[in-house]
Image (cartoon, helix red, strand yellow):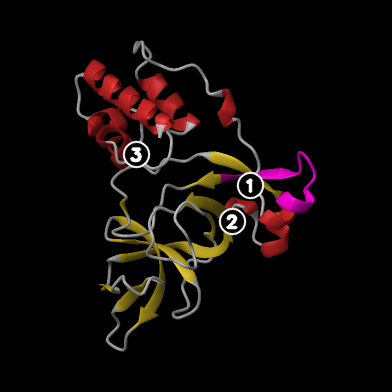
Amino acid sequence: MEGLDQDAELIRALVRFSGKTSAEVARAAGLAASTINRHFNGTATTRLSLSTVEKLRAAYPDFAGWPLPRAAEKQQPFKHPEYMLENRASNGDTVELDQIDLRYGMGGTFADGPIEVERRPFSREWLRSITSTSPKHLFWAIGDGDSMEPTIRSGEIVLIDRSQNTPRMDDGIWAVTHGEIGMIKRLRQLPSGVVELHSDNQLVRPQTAVDGELHVIGRVIAVVRRL
């Protein structure tokens, strides 16, 4: 938790320095308000990304509290555990994919502004083993919550194919926005035309979406589990 506490103190100090609200600080840097609010309120579960810090630094270059670059956060390719164990992916044979801060779980996350994007390298060999889709249509997200357990656990990385944006109901798991909330769910269309959003956690009740409320981002095609 030490790193999260450091990030929270950084954001709070920056907000005090700016004389603005946390949402206004985010807007000035071209970031989603939720990205900054989570750290300001102490509810974040992941560290500030390097790209977020760089955007904030560019917006507030006179702030004296900027940290030195975190050497430990040099980007490393994410690989399926099988590849981690057998080390079959060639060094350098990677492709960078965009992140989208699209959390799933109890209530999802509010998509209330620009979506923060970070790039990470993935094993090209692993990507070819699971999809023929061009990398330009793929992006990744980190889950936060337990609504899709046991299929997807909190903290796991999900790979999403944006070229698949017309869902086949009752087939697969989809990244969607319901209103302004981003989430990952199974979809089921009722005879009335209403779409139900189902979680794999049986304790989470289905939600319903009518015309105009549901926007499909893409289909979840892989879950990257860590050993």
33 left or right, relative to 160: left
Query: Local crowd at mark 1 within 10 Å, few (<14), some, or many (≥20)?
Result: some
Disc 2 to disc 3, how far (Cα)? Answer: 23 Å
Count the marks: 3
For the point 32% across and 77% down, which residue is it?
Answer: 195
Q: Which residue is mark 1?
A: 78
Q: Earlier in the sequence, mark 2 or mark 3?
A: 3
Q: Earlier in the sequence, mark 3 or mark 1?
A: 3
Q: Which residues are magenta?
A: 84-97
Which amino acid does the dot numbered 1 rest on? Answer: Phe
For the point 45% across and 81% down, which residue is it?
Answer: 170
Q: Could you say where residue 202 lies in the image, as x and y percent from the top left?
A: 36, 75
198 left or right, relative to 77: left
Q: Could you say where residue 220 lies in the image, as x and y percent from the top left?
A: 52, 64
101 or 149, nearer to the observer: 149
What mark, if any, has residue 224 been given in the picture? 2
Disc 3 to disc 1, how far (Cα)? Answer: 23 Å
Query: Local crowd at mark 3 within 10 Å, few (<14), some, or many (≥20)?
Result: many
Q: Nearer the viewer, mark 2 or mark 3?
A: 2
Which amino acid does the dot numbered 2 rest on? Answer: Val
Kindly state the secondary structure of the residue where label 2 is placed. strand
Magenta segment includes 88: yes
In the rendered view, would you say 111 is above or below 120? below
Q: Which residue is mark 3?
A: 35
161 or 225, nearer to the observer: 225
Kindly state the secondary structure of the residue where label 3 is placed. helix
